[in-house]
Amino acid sequence: MRPKGEKAMATKKILLVDDSCTARLVNRMIFSQKTNYVLVSAVDGKEAVERAREEKPDLILMDIVMPRMTGLEACRVLKKDKDTERIPIILLTTRGEEKYVQEGYASGCSDYLTKPVNDAELLDLLKAYLGE
Amino acid sequence: MSSTRNGSRPPAQTACQTEPVNGSSGVPAGTEELRRRVQQLSLREQLERHHFLLERLNAASARLIEALEHGDVCEAIGEIIANLIGSEEVAIFHYFPLVRSFKLAWSSGVENDVLRAFGSGAGFLGRAAHGQTSQFPERLVNTPLMCYEKNLTACIVLKSSNEVVGVIAILGLLPQKSCLEWADFELLKFLEVYGAVALQFQRLQQEKVAP
């Protein structure tokens, strides 16, 4: 049974971008059990840019280190595109040090979370951006 | 913008000091209410912690099964450790008990000379394999570390049917992670058993394929 107040999140769509199958699996579990967000996924930055243009998600949750195109590069591309520039992007990073975080913000991301991701922390942040 | 947060919950409401006394116990009603709420929060936290663990175990087991079909088991174990525990410095060794020797199976983020040193089987890696027990150097403060073990967090034995088939050396944790936590130890116990099963499955598959 879903906690009260979480049904209002039904129409929001999130694009999850991570080359790690484990990360996609665990995030899918968190979302399916605790929220009504619609989740679409991509496995690298290049696919993320394509899917963001097609799907027009309400928010993008994106890993940084990925093959073909990194999360930072994808973030820059999305922020230069008029169709996607307004989509908030949360970067998922293994590196929580200041210089890496600043690099993330410089690429145009709205926020960041460090891995391993904490469920409560992730859901609080999503609520902050997408509303209840 | 925000920095990372810990999943904090709203604090329990503070009790009013001037509330009436509970008839039989002599405890102010507000204090009783506060105690009840604290207990409820604690029970809720227990359930949430357990749920958090189950989600991760579920993801880890799904990832191992997926690796049996389409990928490399060692890479899957490395990915589980990176994403669910928080270390990108991992080496996995096959262990051959009859000759008590190790062979590197997979690694990520570990220097070659450190891998060679671990592969010799001295120190905690050997201790884990020969003793069939995972080792956590932090718990053994009186045991001296070899120079290449300075960054070692754990040596996890992969044990299938009472036989050690491999050992995972987990070196440095991610900077934002200071130590292993309760859920990490549970996940490592899962890998001890099911990581070993998956590794053995893959070995048999490779033997079958090899001429």
Image (spheres, rainbow, N blue to C red):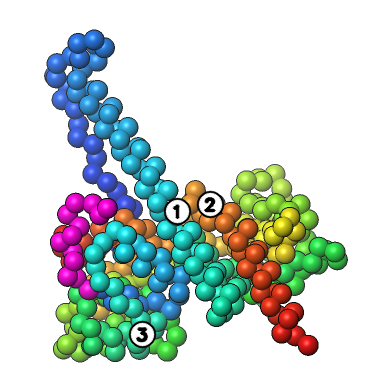
Disc 3 target residue = A45
Q: Which residues are magenta?
A: A1-13
Secondary structure at numbered mark 2? helix
- At 75% across and 58% down in the image, what residue appears? B163
Disc 1 target residue = B53
Q: Are marks 1 and 2 on the same chain?
A: yes
Q: Which mark is residue A69?
A: none
Please, which chain is the residue tagged with disc 3 on?
A: A
Name the amino acid type tagged 1: Leu
Horizontal side of residue A60 vs B181, given as left or right: left
Per the model, the C-alpha gap separating discs 1 and 2 is 8 Å
Horizontal side of residue A38 vs B69, given as left or right: left
Please, which chain is the residue tagged with disc 2 on?
A: B
Name the amino acid type tagged 2: Glu
Which image quarter: residue B39? Answer: top left
Nearer the camera: disc 1 or disc 3: 1
Disc 2 target residue = B186
